[in-house]
Image (spheres, rainbow, N blue to C red):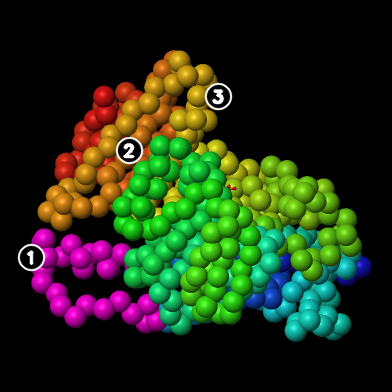
């Protein structure tokens, strides 16, 4: 069989784009197949537009505290419609930029949905029909198709929004119910609240952000409640009724919430629909494509990176997996991705960021006696004049035997920026003594990390 491409990449999101361009830079002949917009979740309907909405949603509070800094404003008005339109315009710009970058790197963009017809060939369909003239053949195939939001299995779930839909609104209704307690639920609850929407957030458990350090998730919870977000714990959605703009969400406990919109932020799953993995012989592990440390599936020339592998579902991880694959297979520079000490942030308000082990994980792994916890909880100087706002929480988890810092966590202003830098120190094996030896930079929030006793 003819193999005109060295590499076919399925999916032009963060991982696929990074792999395609890197492979092409090593001289490979590359095609990338994408049925949706080039850019993927991060650029089109995730990190980028979300962060822009976060920026926009911060202004209302800034306007409220402005008088305490001597700034007098009148007639300020939040127009979410303008913000949403501007965000979409920026997404359009980035989408065009990524298409242009593919061309500049010599990667052939094939528009349509890829579907395996054999271990080395992919058919492409458009508008639901396979284009018989376009079957691609490749020596290597990379599956980088990402994930999709998952709706809970309740009657009327299709009436709710998933995160993708949030970016396509022309405005937001006065009252929204957010279902879920993870990244997306907390981020959107805060965005909507900041834009003046009344938000009720339904959490099926007893706390937000399961899996994060518990004290940090409580700090986010306090901050969100302090702002006026109505958090309801122990509430499971049961059914959604009504019509767009006029909905009633009922819960298993019998509560009923009327609102203009419901965001179902109940997790994401690998997007396997239509791939026809059987034709390639790729086996699944549950709902994900399982790969080894070299991103290889059970079929040695078929690889997978990013959210479709459901390991650490973050953009920088997918990019590094894609580049490591391309460097190893096409660049004679074999390398594996380090999945340890990956920093992450929730752009809630207050913001949470974290690297390393939580207090709970450290105790599980090393035992309570071996773990020392340092914390600082305080009001930042930015709040001195307005006399309002959530407290910051900074936390270090230290191994008593080695003095090594196992985890570095923060809730508060600029948490993500600060933890990004702290993650370098942790990756280098920093100890508490290293932190203590570092002179404080005053007055900052993060100086507390080097003055904790
Ligand atoms: P998460 O897995 O973070 O959270 C899903 C939430 O939905 C959990 O609170 C879960 O509850 C709840 N849930 C699941 N099923 C149901 C149900 N049937 N009824 C009620 N609640 C339910 O998923 P997200 O969608 O928020 O985010 C997906 C992934 O996207 C993240 O894990 C992250 O990798 C990535 N992401 C990263 C961001 C960032 O880096 N800032 C931002 C956004 C997304 P429970 O806890 O009880 O299981």
Which residue is identified by label 3? 365
Contact (Cβ within 8 Å) of mark 2 with mark 1: no
Residue ranking furthest to the left: 70
- Residue at the spot 45% in from the left edge and 15% down from the top edge: 369
Disc 2, SS? strand
Q: Is residue 106 something that shows in the picture?
A: no
- Residue at the spot 50% in from the left edge and 43% down from the top edge: 206
Q: CA distance from mark 2 to mark 1?
A: 30 Å
Q: Is residue 309 left or right of residue 257?
A: right
**Disc nearer the start of the sequence (1/3):** 1
Where does the N terminus fall, quadrant-wise? Answer: bottom right
Q: CA distance from mark 1 to mark 3?
A: 51 Å
**Disc nearer the start of the sequence (2/3):** 3
- Residue at the spot 32% in from the left edge and 23% down from the top edge: 433
Residue 28 image point, x, y percent? 70, 64
Disc 3, SS? helix
């Amino acid at each position: 069989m003819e193999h005109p491409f060295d590499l076919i990449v399925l999916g032009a999101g963060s991982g696929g784009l990074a792999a395609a361009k890197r492979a092409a830079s090593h001289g490979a002949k590359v095609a990338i197949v994408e049925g949706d917009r080039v850019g993927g979740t991060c650029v089109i309907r995730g990190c980028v537009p979300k962060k822009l909405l976060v920026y926009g949603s911060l202004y209302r509070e800034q306007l409220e505290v402005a008088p305490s800094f001597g700034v007098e404003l009148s007639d300020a008005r939040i127009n979410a419609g303008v913000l949403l339109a501007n965000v979409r315009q920026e997404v359009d710009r980035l989408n065009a930029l990524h298409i242009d970058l593919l061309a500049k790197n010599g990667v052939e963009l094939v528009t349509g949905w890829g579907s395996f017809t054999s271990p080395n060939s992919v058919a492409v369909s458009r508008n639901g029909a396979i284009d018989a003239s376009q079957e691609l053949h490749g020596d290597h195939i990379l599956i980088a198709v990402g994930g999709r939001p998952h709706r809970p299995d309740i009657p009327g779930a299709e009436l709710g929004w998933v995160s993708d839909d949030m970016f396509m609104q022309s405005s937001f209704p006065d009252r929204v119910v957010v279902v879920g307690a993870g990244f997306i639920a907390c981020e959107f609850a805060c965005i909507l609240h900041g834009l003046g929407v009344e938000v009720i957030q339904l959490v099926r458990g007893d706390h937000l952000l399961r899996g994060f350090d518990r004290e940090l998730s409580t700090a986010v919870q306090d901050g969100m409640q302090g702002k006026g977000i109505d958090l309801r714990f122990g509430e499971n959605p049961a059914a959604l009724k009504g019509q767009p703009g006029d909905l009633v969400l009922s819960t298993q406990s019998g509560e009923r919430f009327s609102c203009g919109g419901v965001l179902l932020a109940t997790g994401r799953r690998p997007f396997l629909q239509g791939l026809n993995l059987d034709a390639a012989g790729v086996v699944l592990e549950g709902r994900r494509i399982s790969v080894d440390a070299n991103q290889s599936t059970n079929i040695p020339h078929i690889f997978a990176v990013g959210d479709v592998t459901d390991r650490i579902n973050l953009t920088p991880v997918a990019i590094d997996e894609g580049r490591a694959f391309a460097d190893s297979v096409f660049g004679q520079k074999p390398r594996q991705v380090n999945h340890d000490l990956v920093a992450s942030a929730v752009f809630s308000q207050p913001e949470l960021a974290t690297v390393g082990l939580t207090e709970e994980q450290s105790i599980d792994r090393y035992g309570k006696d071996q773990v020392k916890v340092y914390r600082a909880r305080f009001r930042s100087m930015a709040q001195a004049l307005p006399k309002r706002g959530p407290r910051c929480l900074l936390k270090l988890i230290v191994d008593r035997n080695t003095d090594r810092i196992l985890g570095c966590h923060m809730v508060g202003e600029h948490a993500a920026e600060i933890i990004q830098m702290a993650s370098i120190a942790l990756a280098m094996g920093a100890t508490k003594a290293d932190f203590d030896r570092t002179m404080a930079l005053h007055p900052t929030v993060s100086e507390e990390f080097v003055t904790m006793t």
